Image: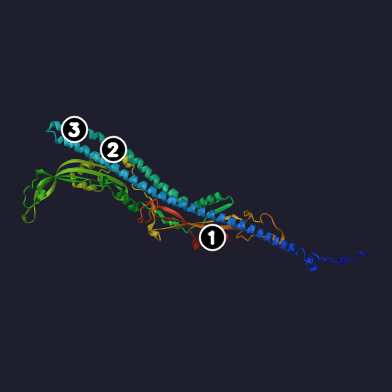
Amino acid sequence: MSRALHCIAPRAGTPARRAPFPLSVRRHRGQALVLCLVLLFAGCLGLFFMFSTGRIAASRQRLDNAADAAAYSAALWRARVMNFHAYSNRAIVAEEVAIAQAVTLVSWARYFETFSANASVLATPFPPVATVLAAAADLARGNALVVEEAASEEIAARNAYKQLLATSQEVLQHAVDTFALGAVANEVARANDRRFFAFALPEDGEFTRMTRRYAAHERERLQGVVDASLDTFVAGPRGLDMTMVLMPSACFGNPFAGVDTWFHVLRKRGGTVMSPRFERWEAADTMSLHGYWPEDGFFGFEGCFDWEALPLGWGAAEAGRDVPTGALQADPGGVLENWSAASAAQAAMNGRNLPGFAAYSGTPEVRDLAYDTLADPRFPVSRVAVLARVGGDDVRTANVLDVGVGRLRLGENYAGRKLWSLSAAELYFRRPGGESARTEYASLFNPYWQVRLVEPSAAQRVLADGYVR
């Protein structure tokens, strides 16, 4: 039989069988595989592109976070220096108050010494009382010597510590310039990734102009804070007026004089002040018995004038670079009203000052806000901008990993062949959340300087563009 026949007629009564697929369908079998291969290639190409894009996006996100951390840390270092200025200023005020207290205690001890000695003399007609007062005078004399020695050492020590604080302010102020902040920013950025590099953008002197060291003749603000911090006993006046109704004066019953001039008056005066030029503390305490003496007035009328009948107690002390002076430069608490007692106090003060009293060098020159140059003296701010970068070769894209050839070799068009990120933080003054809600203006006497991240300014962006290109 010929094998050219491809079909045999079916038997009679048997239904004819149809071919499994038409010829046209059998000719198109396997075309879906080509489409799948094309789609698979496109998917792989997409994944190839997404790999590089994802690596760049991840590196950029990490660089942004590092730049934010670097800017915040740089501004935080500056805020800590500002808060150190505030703490040191408060410490200097406390040292000044302690020195004023030491001078006051010496004056009071010397006053109590002379008052006890004079009281024992006045009580001579009464031997038992005189004996007790003489013993009290000896104790007062020993107490005065101890107080003088202790005050001398304390004044010298506190003055040295105060000067050290003022000097440390200037040292730390130079630690927050642009170069120092750049070192801080770079250290933080490298802590995130050792391939990162960051630096602080130069400033136009904004922060430098924000504060200044007040010169010797500009210490009124600091001295005002010191005076406001003195307790009532030190600040004075330590005064007392007591009318001695059992001791009539020479004007007793004078119809042309007031009733308040008919009796002797016991007057206690005292106080502690910073003398002129902010370089000397002085304290004085006096007590005298005052009487009134008749005098001729206008048109023949008689009046009464006040005269210091008997000085009872006196004491004075001074601390300054020019001591001993032997004279009060001011009138603390009105002690000169008891003129004779004040003169005796000054004479005694001249020969009883120990070396520590001369060690006091005056109110120091401290750093404070430069209010006259601030755009907003009440709520000033200062910005720190940090520019961070990472090399393009450190971003592990497909091109860096040497994946792909020809047109599949994807290149990255970085600015300056690096990835860049700009961040900024702001230094500002505000009371902490747990404090009272009252508004407080900025100063370098309260440590309320804080930091927050902000948008870089237009000027900072322009400056950063100069580095990126």
Mark 2 nearby-residue class (10 Å; few <14, some 14–19, many ≥20):
many
Residue 241, given in percent of the width and then of the height, sits at 17, 46
Please give the label number shown on residue 148: 2
Please give the label number shown on residue 134: 3
In the displayed structure, does residue 108 sit left or right of residue 219?
Answer: left
Residue 320, given in percent of the width and then of the height, sits at 31, 44
The reply to whether residue 165 is in sight is yes
Using the image as rendered, state which of residue 437 and residue 331 is in the foreground.
437
Asked if disc 3 and disc 2 are in contact, CB closer than 8 Å, the reply is no
Query: Against 211, is 35 above or below?
Result: below
Please give the label number shown on residue 464: 1
Q: CA distance from mark 1 to mark 2?
A: 63 Å
Quarter of the view holding residue 267 = top left
Q: Earlier in the sequence, mark 3 or mark 2?
A: 3
Residue 99, given in percent of the width and then of the height, sits at 31, 43
Q: Disc 1 residue type?
A: Ala
Q: Indicate the secondary structure of the residue bearing disc 3.
A: helix
Mark 1 nearby-residue class (10 Å; few <14, some 14–19, many ≥20):
many
